[in-house]
Amino acid sequence: MTDTIKTDVLIIGAGPCGLFAVFELGLLDMKVHLVDILDKLGGQCAELYPEKPIYDIPAIPMVTGQGLTDALMEQIKPFNPTFHLNEMVETIEKIGDPLFRVTTDAGQVFETKVVVISAGGGSFQPKRPPVPGIEAYEGTSVFYAVRKMEQFRGKDLLIVGGGDSALDWVLNLQPIARRVTLLHRRDDFRAAPHSVDQMRKLVAAGKMNLKLGQVTALEGENGMLSGAMVKGNDNETFKIDCNTMLPFFGLTMKLGPVANWGVKLENNLVPVDTEAFETNVPGIFAIGDINTYPGKLKLILSGFHEGALMAQKASRYVFPDKRVVFQYTTSSSSLQKKLGVN
Ligand code: FAD
């Protein structure tokens, strides 16, 4: 058992919103520890779409998921947060006013004045298609996320699904794969119309295949896929030759232990006020995808805003006697000193 760590703020989840919150808390002199189940920082951006472009981060016309994570890490460097990766927060116990004892599945105990839940969709897991024996191919020929596009260079890819992820990966991987086949239940896609148009153009030019139907069985040996049996919409069964399959059937939001933390939940999300993004428990805040309030948009930029307002209120719990003076980073020499630029 390791020693109890005492901190001002404990952030649960090192996705983009948790990372940016370190910056806002740091400007107000709060010390932060972050815990994440994943073995990496960046949440969904790093885990689900590290190489895909994001176009709606204010003032950054284009950045990849990993690029955004790296930039956030650079931005929060002056505040020297401590990360605890591969650990899941299991329990939160209120022991003061406010003071919380937080425990992870690795047995680490924290005592913290403020808790920030930025747990995204909780422990998110891809949905597994109902294909018998698919487990035997997972990690060798069947993948639910693209970590490195290079891994798929020269492959015969079968991409299954009709949403944005399936279409985006068709378009991104088609130039490097030997052959791409997209399989969907029907000739109607939930993805962005522009992506669907681009996919149809590639099919018309003979640069990829589009098939309709559902995978019923996989063929191969020792985890190495050689083909997928597909039941077409005319009930005929046919084989698609492939050595790699990427099913994109969406993610299951497994809320995990959040449900036991004593905060109110609404449809597996944490309701908060919009002044400080605080939960029904004073001292426990929720920012990013995990929270809900009227008009909520699950966008990274919303989570950044939420982190800034959260930090103002958090500082009142951490430093009850200190008056928070609103300052700009552009003109405040004291903020610039904290950032190490002055
Ligand atoms: P997440 O990024 O979900 O991070 C939450 C972290 O919390 C995870 O790392 C998880 O492991 C951790 N966690 C959960 N429970 C625990 C626990 N009990 N203990 C420890 N750790 C825990 N948004 C945009 O604004 N623009 C876009 O263009 C855009 N494109 C997207 C494309 C795709 C394919 C996807 C999937 C999402 C996209 N999004 C986009 C959405 C964006 O990624 C999310 O809004 C954002 O990641 C939410 O950030 P977050 O920090 O709230 O949560």
Image: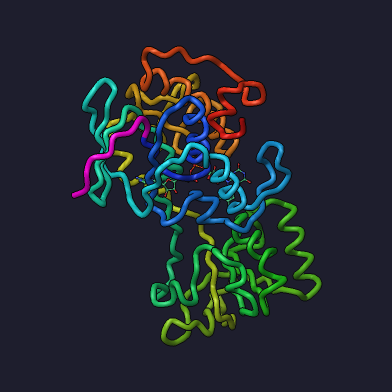
Q: Is residue 70 above or below residue 291?
A: below
Question: Which quadrant of the figure has residue 51?
Answer: bottom right
- Is any atom of residue 260 visible in this view? no
Residue in the image at 42% along x and 14% along y: 322
Indicate yes or no whether the magenta region holds residue 180: no
Query: Residue 144, how many percent across, how many down?
Result: 50, 64
Query: Residue 338, how many percent across, how many down?
Result: 53, 30
In this image, 223 relative to 200: left or right? left
Query: Residue 160, how many percent across, how many down?
Result: 57, 67
Task: Work out which quarter of the rendered image holds the C terminus and state it.
Answer: top right
Residue in the image at 55% along x and 76% along y: 244
* Furthest-right residue in this view: 205
Question: Which quadrant of the figure has residue 259?
Answer: top left
In this image, 95 relative to 29: left or right? left
Q: Is residue 326 above or below residue 69?
A: above
In this image, 5 relative to 245: left or right? left
Most foreground residue, 282 or 186:
282
Query: Residue 173, how many percent across, how many down?
Result: 66, 68
Most foreground residue, 215 or 249:
249
Residue in the image at 71% along x and 58% along y: 196
Region in magenta: 1-9
